[in-house]
Amino acid sequence: MQPRTSQLLGRLSESATIAMSRKARELKAAGRDIISLSLGEPDFDTPDPIKAAGIRAIEENHTHYPPVPGFADVREAICQKLQRDNGLTYSADQIVVSTGAKHSLMNVILSLVDAGDEVILPTPYWVSYADMVNLAGGQVVEVQTGIAQDFKMTAEQLRGALTENTRVVMLNSPNNPSGSVYTSEEMAAIADVLRAHPHAIAISDEIYEYINFTAQHASFAAQPGMMERTVTVNGVSKGFAMTGWRIGYIAAPQWIAAACTKLQGQFTSGASGISQKATAAAMNGGGSLAADMKAAFLQRRDLVISGLKAIDGLDVNTPQGAFYIFPDVSALFGKSCNGHTISSGQDLAMYLLEEAEVATVGGDAFGSPNCMRISYAASETQLQEAIRRISAAVARLS
């Protein structure tokens, strides 16, 4: 029998972050001293009150099939969080709990996007967005941003990208991979443009909400008139160091929530009941449970920025959220060392992996080939050593 996979699978590429992480693990297994700054995972443990809620859930036998959109009390806890933190009033039937925010995003895109529909992605964008659109048969429309504008799409850029075929506009703040954070004023300008295009739905990915170094997180759905046209996607992985608990959720107009519930019912059914009960504790605790982690990330951000700015050829801005630095490395293009010629961020990432034993991710996968993503979700000791190695390796390029 000749192996044959579906044409649908051929529309997907492997996640660049996962691929780099796998390569780093392989080199480690071969005895190389790799410092991995490639994955977007907090290096902290889940807060104790959340773990205790998960243990109670096991003891109370929440181990049977849960409802497809999530337990009613968990969805209500999410509603209370949205009201408290974001000024948004939802009912439980507008919330769908899924197996991670990635699952939530996939549900929404498959529920909204048909073949030929356009989805606007401001660059840089999280690696999976484009493949999700491709899977649905949609057309990616990139809006290019750069470091000079802190990697944020302007209202005028959005106006120029919108067409009658636009189905979805993807927003992500704080942003992966750039760490950029949109202000409420910037969100308001984008909302003004979208009001003239009532056929377009906004998906606002706010998974890094609690790792935000500005005074206030701005939810796009809070803009006047946008709540009925916005799907807010969030979860517990980043802000509460709960990556392995696999819980994400959407808050959406009821018709979109119902569509996602229908789709999820045929794919995975309900997310883990144990993880859901732990999520309720996270929602009730809110940002206070993430405060120590956020403070540590801010200190690390400043350490890494200081070190990277001292390296010739790296253009570095100061991101206001998440745990990434996204330097523009185009000044190094055309340089080479030991058979490595740098023509893109991905080239530089592979060079640093082989020559400096530091794993990063090239910006190519994020729609920004002039850049490279560095995660500072690592100890200060590891970060200092990684910067030393990167500096030495870049200095060898000529």
Image (spheres, rainbow, N blue to C red):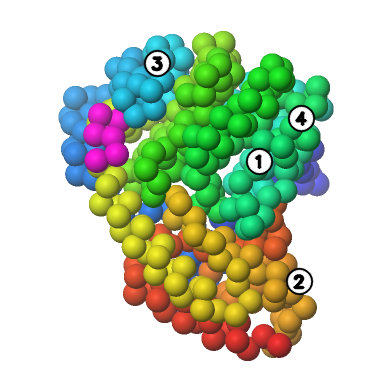
**Which secondary structure lies at badge 2?**
loop
Please provide the residue range marked out in magenta. 282-288
**Which secondary structure lies at badge 3?**
loop
Q: Quadrant of residue 382?
A: bottom left
Q: Is residue 285 magenta?
A: yes
* Quarter of the figure that contains the C terminus: bottom right
Query: Circle 3 is placed at which residue position?
Result: 89
Q: Amino acid under label 1?
A: Thr
Q: Amino acid under label 2?
A: Ser
Q: Nearer the viewer, mark 1 or mark 3?
A: 1
Question: Which one is earlier in the sequence, the residue at label 1 or at label 4?
Answer: 1
- Characterize the magenta stretch by its predominant secondary structure: helix
Q: Residue 67: horizontal and vertical position, in percent?
A: 40, 16
Q: Amino acid under label 3?
A: Thr
Question: Which one is earlier in the sequence, the residue at label 4 or at label 3?
Answer: 3
Residue 104 can be seen, yes or no:
no
Nearer-the-camera pick, 261 or 310 = 310
- Give the distance between the C-alpha atoms of the residues marked 1 and 2, in whole angstroms: 28 Å
* Quarter of the figure that contains the N terminus: top right
Q: In this picture, is 381 found above or below 13?
A: below
